[in-house]
Image (cartoon, rainbow, N blue to C red):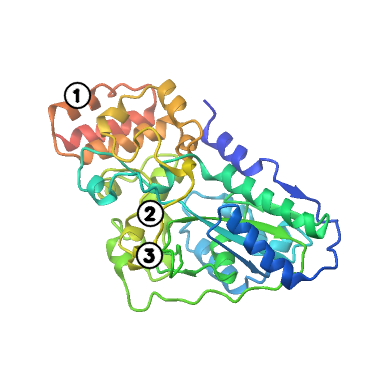
Amino acid sequence: MPTYREIHRQIHSTPAMSKPFSIPAPALDYPALARQIKSWGAELGFQQVGITDTELGTDEAHLVNWLAAGWHGEMNYMQRQGTRRSRPQELLPGTMRIISARMNYWPADAAAADTVLDDPALAYVSRYALGRDYHKLIRKRLQRLAEKIETVSGPFGYRAFTDSAPVLEKALAQKAGLGWLGKHTNLINEQAGSWFFLGELYTNLPLPADPPGEEHCGTCQACIEACPTGAIVAPYQLDARLCISYLTIELRGSIPEHLRPLIGNRIYGCDDCQLVCPWNRFAEATREADFHTRNRLDASSLIQLFSWDRQEFESRMQGSAIYRIGYECWLRNIAVALGNAPTTTEIVAALEGRRNDPTGLVREHVAWALRQHG
């Protein structure tokens, strides 16, 4: 099985869907084209499309301060990418406008999140990861959007992204009018909540920019109070090193022991800050069949998932966002959750069965879990 770093390189170095930016921007009725782009976006399954320029000075300052504080943890690639993340024209010279799009992912067919979180014998998987990996689907839709634009404009320079390059996607979406950055640092839309993916089409077309989204969090502190590990250290400030999503997905090594009890039964990601957000009462379920629940990951038992061998993990998780963390981290995360569950003979037996796992990372977390059960 590929290592995490190999998978990471595959995701972030896959040839982008693009046309060279050396192609000059055509002379067009750009306001009319912008209206047509939004109409096409709706036809392609996006719930909203907006357009923005490339100026991200304020967001760049926030990013620089965040990195200086070390809150990115072991995501060292964020520092290596420098200002390309906050300066689109450094990433792709010639970029004039960014088309930002959002697509709902909340799976209506999934078991109620609160029900799963309240049952320590069940495994909680972040709701965005219950279906197929979103990267390819959204990028293909953005490619189709670019092809529709070409029917009017002729050849133009563009490149499609969705969490696949150094892009400040949430800042760009906010500038494009798709919502605002909430106190939990996720994008919120006042008519759709926050359960959606984002994608971008960098272009050399001088399209009219939309007004930015306005902030509507007010005095609400629900997300800050709900965070199990206190990762939202202040409004709009997230220390990723404490975030359960970081600990179970991005962190490749040992999860700090003092944080393990706080993870509960969350084995891949964490939705707590979104689950309590009052704006999500307006959220709509996804229309995409690919985002519906697969492999019963919405409410599977921890013991059942812990019993998977490597072949079963690879077979079931192929095409899932979960695949990229690898089998060892999958077992690591479940071992922690089993350590947090009430003691039963079945749980202890499952852990004992992996006490001598060939991977040191798994053995360490299994041993910790067994100590929790005396």
Q: Quadrant of the C terminus?
A: top left
Q: Is residue 367 left or right of residue 51?
A: left
Image: 203 above or below 143:
below
Q: CA distance from mark 2 to mark 1?
A: 30 Å
Distance from the alpha carbon under mark 3 to that under mark 2: 25 Å
The residue at which mark 1 appears reads as 349
Rendering coords of residue 239 (x, y %): 41, 60
Mark on residue 108? none
Image coordinates for residue 271, horizontal then vertical, percent: 35, 53
Of callouts 3 and 2, which one flags the residue occurring earlier in the amino acid sequence?
Answer: 2
- Residue at image point 32% right, 32% down: 364
Work out whether residue 157 can be spotted: no
Callout 2: helix, strand or loop? loop
Residues at discs 3 and 1 in contact (Cβ within 8 Å): no
Which marked residue is nearer to the observer: mark 3 or mark 2?
Answer: 3
Residue 59 image position (x, y, % from top left): 57, 70
Residue tagged 2: 243
Q: Tell me what residue is drawn at x 73 percent, y 66 percent.
A: 33
Q: Amino acid at mark 3?
A: Phe
